[in-house]
Image (tube, rainbow, N blue to C red):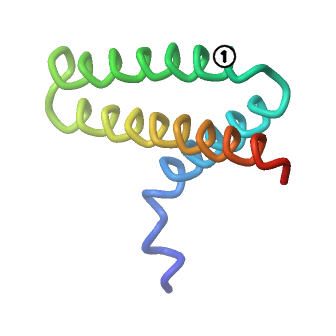
Amino acid sequence: MDALMLDGWTPILLCGIVFAIVMFITSRKVSRKSLISTSTVLSLICIGVIIYSVIGIGGWDGMGLGLFMITILAGIWIGTVIGAISRSSNL
């Protein structure tokens, strides 16, 4: 029964988790400078889409797209930070 409570949130959470895993894997393959540059560019794209969803779309549709982008933004930076920390400590 509790699994049904996450039914609507699962795609949003899954997308954030996927972006965190992708950024973690990317942190293992590229230099720190390119990792931060990639994260910054993706973050700017997410922030642009969030602003567009609030101003351009509006309503519930805009809030849904904004929440989706906030989850992706959180996944990008969580994956970047965990990847950078684990790379520096050689885990």
Q: Quadrant of residue 81?
A: top right
Measured as percent of width and height from the top left, residue 50 is found at: 30, 25
Q: Residue at x 68, y 38 (%)?
A: 84
Location of the C terminus (image quadrant): bottom right
Q: Secondary structure at mark 1?
A: helix
**Residue 43 horizontal side relative to residue 55, left or right:** right
**Residue 15 horizontal side relative to residue 86, left or right:** left
Measured as percent of width and height from the top left, residue 19 is found at: 62, 37
Work out whether residue 75 or residue 53 is closer to the camera in this orientation and state it.
75
Work out whether residue 37 or residue 76 is closer to the camera in this orientation and state it.
37
Q: Quadrant of residue 62?
A: top left
Q: Residue at x 57, y 42 (%)?
A: 15
**Residue 35 horizontal side relative to residue 16, left or right:** right
Q: How many marks?
A: 1
Q: Residue at x 61, y 36 (%)?
A: 80
Q: Residue at x 31, y 39 (%)?
A: 64
Measured as percent of width and height from the top left, residue 41 is found at: 51, 13
Q: Amino acid at mark 1?
A: Lys
Q: Quadrant of residue 79?
A: top right
* Residue annotated with mark 1: 33
Q: Is residue 52 above or below residue 1?
A: above
**Residue 87 horizontal side relative to residue 14, left or right:** right
How packed mark 1 is, by other alpha carbons closer than 10 Å (few <14, some 14-19, many 20 or more), is few
Given the current orientation, which residue lies at the most extreme front position?
A: 89
